[in-house]
Image (cartoon, rainbow, N blue to C red):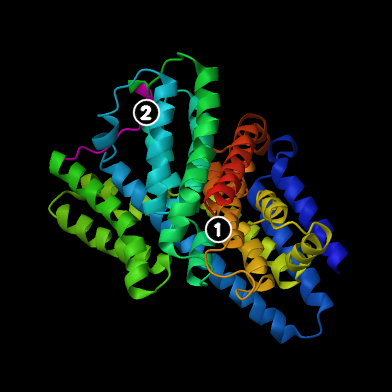
């Protein structure tokens, strides 16, 4: 069974990577892969009740991420419908592409630590659609945004799912992870930005031509500013909501979406139907990219079978016995998170290493937070931020591998070496 599962996963992964050459949508490949993996697993198990329970658990965790993604994308669409992003785009005056990239990189890096890497990626890529007229430039910026969002999420206890897992599990504490991983994460971003800005030179920013901009329904300055502030406020409030209530983030985003819906209906209640329709949440929900969401469902359910069959746990144990060195093992886990989801990899590691042997804020857990958080940037489907970017900008797997993976890889190793040096010097 295990061999069959690995073969099917590899084939599904290859089909996703080869989406453009074989002309089969990645969502179809992900769903077929998930269906086959769960079918093989179910047919090879005698305890069907256990399989159903495990599928229910996987569906629950997948649904939480999907609901969160849908909520965040809808909020971004509503703000965009009110031309709210004009509040930011009108203030960006730089004419050099490299300067803009540094600005976008740092804004994404810090915003990701406050929100999370997935939401930040959605917001920043939406902004780039307002600023950049050339598709090639937008794709490149999307790649940098993925690197910056994952780097920013790694040093914050609420910035990335895996860091949050380690925080809730007691493996790390808030202040220690910020102190220990901030500099390596910053280096993870700065190195790719430095290389990119050197290659770009003085290349100018090509803005969005007037004729190609999406036409918006006329809104007042108050409506623009208010909906922008409320949309961003809801996104920022989600981590606070999670901390105060201990409810999962998707509940916070859905609650916020309801409030935004209510306020939007009240603001536009006196307008004619034709004028009000493009500004409503119903219209925004119809515009979100459901193909990307379906792909997300497929890939997460596919990876879940590797977790339930303990393939990932076995991989972690094999690494422990054959490699031995903790720093090398954690770096390999980080690289592996570019291929499979970092969540089950970190979950397997949390189960494999005891807090008695590796206490809270020890080298293993902090380095795990960095490597698992930033390693997913190396491939486009290695992180939630990457998957979201792939859907929003229709990024080709091999284009990302050719243009962005190398930058992400050198940033990953540079940050890892900085963390190891930091630990050796300061302890």
Query: In terms of secondary structure, where does tag 1 sit?
Result: helix
Pick whichever of labels 1 and 2 is earlier in the sequence: 2
Res 411 seen here: yes
Q: Nearer the viewer, mark 1 or mark 2?
A: 1
Which quadrant of the view contains residue 108?
top left
Query: Which residue appears at 52% of the width and 72% of the height?
Result: 169
215 part of magenta stretch: yes
Name the mark on residue 131. Answer: 2
Looking at the figure, which quarter contains the C terminus?
Answer: bottom right
In this view, 137 is above or below 360: above
Q: Nearer the viewer, residue 38 or 215?
A: 38
Q: Is residue 120 above or below residue 130?
A: below
How far apart, in angstroms, are the residues tagged by discs 1 and 2?
A: 37 Å
Residue 155 at least partly seen: no
What residue appears at the point 40 percent right and 37 percent down from the top-left corner? 106
Percent x, y of residue 374: 57, 47
Q: What is the magenta range?
A: 211-220
Q: In this view, does 64 lie to the left or right of 376?
A: left
| Numbered badge on residue 31 | none
Q: Determine the secondary structure under disc 2.
A: helix
Magenta highlight: main SS: loop
Between 63 and 402, the one lying in front of the other is 402
Image position of 47 (left or right of 333):
right
Q: How many marks?
A: 2
Q: Dot 1 corresponds to which residue? A: 366
Query: Quick one: quadrant of the N terminus?
Result: bottom right
Identify the residue at horizontal 66%, vertical 39% (top origin): 397
Compared with 310, 267 (above or below) is: above
Instruction: Tell me if 309 is positioned left or right of 3 in this view.
Output: left
Whether tag 1 and tag 2 are in contact, CB under 8 A, the answer is no
């Amino acid at each position: 069974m295990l061999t069959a599962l690995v073969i099917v996963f590899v084939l599904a992964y290859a089909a996703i990577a080869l989406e453009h050459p074989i002309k089969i949508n990645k969502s179809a490949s992900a769903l077929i892969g998930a269906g086959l993996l769960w079918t093989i697993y179910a047919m090879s198990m005698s305890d069907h009740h256990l399989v159903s329970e495990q599928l229910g658990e996987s569906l629950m965790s997948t649904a939480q991420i999907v609901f969160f993604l849908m909520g965040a994308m809808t909020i971004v669409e509503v703000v965009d419908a009110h031309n709210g992003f004009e509040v930011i785009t009108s203030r960006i005056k730089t004419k050099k592409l490299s300067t803009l990239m540094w600005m976008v990189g740092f804004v994404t890096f810090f915003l990701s630590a406050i929100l999370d890497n997935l939401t930040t990626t959605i917001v920043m890529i939406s902004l780039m659609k307002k600023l950049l007229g050339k598709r090639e430039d937008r794709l490149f910026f999307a790649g940098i945004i993925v690197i910056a969002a994952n780097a920013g999420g790694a040093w914050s206890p609420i910035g990335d799912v895996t860091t949050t897992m380690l925080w809730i599990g007691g493996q790390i504490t808030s202040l220690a992870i910020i102190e220990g991983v901030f500099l390596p994460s910053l280096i993870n971003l700065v190195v790719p930005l430095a290389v990119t800005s050197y290659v770009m030179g003085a290349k100018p920013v090509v803005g969005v031509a007037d004729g190609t901009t999406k036409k918006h329904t006329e809104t007042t300055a108050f409506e623009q500013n208010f909906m922008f502030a409320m949309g961003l406020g809801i996104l920022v409030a989600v981590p606070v909501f999670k901390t105060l209530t201990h409810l999962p983030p998707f509940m916070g985003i859905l609650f916020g979406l309801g409030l935004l819906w209510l306020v939007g209906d009240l603001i536009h209640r006196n307008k004619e139907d034709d004028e009000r329709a493009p500004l409503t949440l119903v219209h925004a929900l119809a515009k979100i990219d459901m193909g990307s969401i379906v792909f997300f469902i497929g890939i997460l359910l596919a990876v879940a079978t590797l977790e339930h069959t303990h393939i990932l746990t076995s991989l972690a144990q094999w690494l422990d016995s054959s490699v031995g060195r903790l720093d090398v093992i954690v770096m390999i886990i980080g690289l592996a998170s570019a291929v499979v989801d970092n969540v089950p990899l970190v979950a397997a590691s949390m189960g494999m290493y005891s807090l008695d042997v590796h206490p809270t804020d020890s080298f293993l857990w902090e380095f795990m937070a960095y490597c698992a958080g930033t390693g997913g940037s190396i491939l486009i489907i290695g992180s939630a931020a990457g998957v979201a970017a792939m859907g929003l900008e229709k990024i080709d797997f091999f284009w990302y591998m050719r243009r962005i993976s190398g930058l992400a890889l050198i940033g990953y190793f540079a940050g890892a070496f900085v963390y190891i040096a930091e630990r050796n010097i300061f302890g």
